Image (cartoon, rainbow, N blue to C red):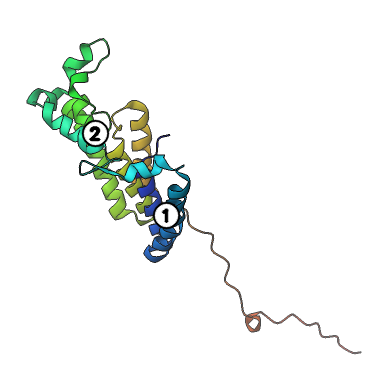
Amino acid sequence: MAFSLAHILVTVIYFLFRIGALKTAALVAAVLIPLAQLAIQVGKLEFLVSRFSITDEQMAGDNRSNQLENFFAVVHPGMLLFGDAECHFRPDRSCDEHGDISSSPATPTYRGGIVALMVQLGAHIGLILAFIRKRPFRLSALTLILLLLQRPFSEFSGYGYITFLLLFLMLNGRAPRRPCRPASVASDQLPAPATTQHQQH
């Protein structure tokens, strides 16, 4: 079972925006304390606890640091310009000797060189602008920034289309407004009903 630390972080940020810091801290404590006790007694939550274990001075759930180290170990000027072009001519279209560089902030540059890097920077700059200028979309922009740092696939056709479509909507759209309730009119301000005067003959 895959359980990403980014999912936990995004969930915490959501509650921070919705209910504030104090209520979020209380909610996190209310969830984590029973889970910790259950993990100790039953041992059924190893998939979650193992993500926070420390091995060789590194959190077990952090595999992005290793990917960045792998990238900096193999990067060269040609890779910065054209990506891992020489690996694309192999039968499996990859260089296993480079190690895992599949899902880190350096992945677009590793795969597509400067063109993919420009696409990645454009997406993040646009999202930062949306976060600053579009208050109703701050949560969405921040969430997408974090997800693209974890899975930077904005240069792929499907992911890229969805990413830039959301970015376009955030920069050019407006959050839906709640319907305004009609202002109540005081009873003493209502016009008096018309009365018909009957003339007596």
State the residue in front, 43 or 110. Answer: 43
Say what amino acid the circle numbered 2 marks: Val
State the residue in front, 157 or 192. Answer: 157
Q: Where is residue 13 in the image (x, y as percent from the top left)?
A: 37, 53
User: What crowding class fits label 2: few (fewer than 14 Cα within 10 Å), some (14-19), or many (20 or more)?
Assistant: some
Write the residue at 20% across / 41% down: 56
State the residue in front, 61 or 149. Answer: 61
Outermost residue toward the top in this view: 91
Query: Secondary structure under badge 2?
Result: helix
Query: Circle 2 sits on which residue?
Result: 119
Write the residue at 24% across / 33% down: 119
The answer to whether residue 41 is above or below residue 22 is above
Q: Quadrant of the N terminus?
A: top left
Write the residue at 40% across / 39% down: 47
Q: Quadrant of residue 46?
A: top left
Q: Where is residue 55 in the image (x, y as percent from the top left)?
A: 24, 41
Q: Where is residue 50 in the image (x, y as percent from the top left)?
A: 35, 41
Write the residue at 12% across / 29% down: 73
State the residue in front, 55 or 130. Answer: 55
Mark on residue 32? 1
